[in-house]
Image (tube, rainbow, N blue to C red):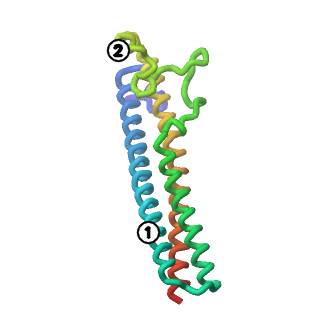
Amino acid sequence: MEDLNKPHFAEDSKEKIDYFVSLTLKQFQMYNSCESKVNILATISAIFIGATIIFIDKGKTLNQPSTICATIINVGMIIMLFLFIISLAIMIWFVGPDKFINPEWVKRKNNQFLPNHRAVYGINQFNNETEYKNYISTLTLKQICDQIITQIYVLNKMIWKIQGVIKKAVILNITGLIIFLLIIFIYLS
């Protein structure tokens, strides 16, 4: 019977690499899910901005007398528009995911980033295909495991940061919607 208290992946092996690759794939799925959320939020924010601009334009044609209600509605619409623009800006800022990578998360050797042969950034560190091929062919199981572990760790850190950004954008959109509902209530009363 196998000892359950003994570390299963203490030794470098193909099985260990397969396990790490499966973890990396799960991290990529979560990252893709975050990107989908960002795309949806950017679209929703843009629709809200358009709707707010139409509402502001429609409000001008109503020629409401200058009252406290009209002032509240105008200020509310400006605040609402501002919230939706900030939300959209946050989502557009996300397009550059390198902003989420903290250099402290990536392993270094002599203050140089260790190239991850599986990541776009790491592959671009090689000058040509031959240099890349030579690097790949000399990798040890330990190096492969180390690089996959680093990739899992960095992806996890990026996902947590992105989730925080998404949360802020959602809060801005919900706040804008609440203001919109208050404006509609004031407008109709």
- Amino acid type of the residue that numbered disc 2 sits on in the rendered structure: Glu
Horizontal and vertical percent for residue 2? 39, 29
Q: Is residue 145 visible?
A: no
- The residue at the point 48 percent across, 69 percent down is 52
Q: Is residue 125 visible?
A: yes
The residue lying toward the viewer, choosing from 93 and 81, is 81
What residue is shown with label 1?
51
> Mark 1: which secondary structure?
helix
- The residue at the point 49 percent across, 28 percent down is 150
181 in relation to 86, above or below: below
Horizontal and vertical percent for residue 92? 48, 48
Which quadrant of the structure image shows residue 72?
Answer: bottom right
- Calculate the distance from the C-alpha at mark 2 to the C-alpha at mark 1: 50 Å
Q: Residues within 10 Å of mark 2 (few under 14, many from 20)?
A: few
What residue is shown with label 2?
129
Horizontal and vertical percent for residue 113? 54, 21
The residue lying toward the viewer, choosing from 34 and 29, is 34
Which quadrant of the structure image shows residue 68?
Answer: bottom right
Q: Is 136 left or right of 95, judged from the image as shown?
A: left
- The residue at the point 42 percent across, 53 percent down is 37
- The residue at the point 37 percent across, 43 percent down is 29
Q: Residues within 10 Å of mark 1 (few under 14, many from 20)?
A: few
> Do callouts 2 and 1 mark residues in contact (Cβ within 8 Å)?
no
Q: Is 120 left or right of 99, judged from the image as shown?
A: left
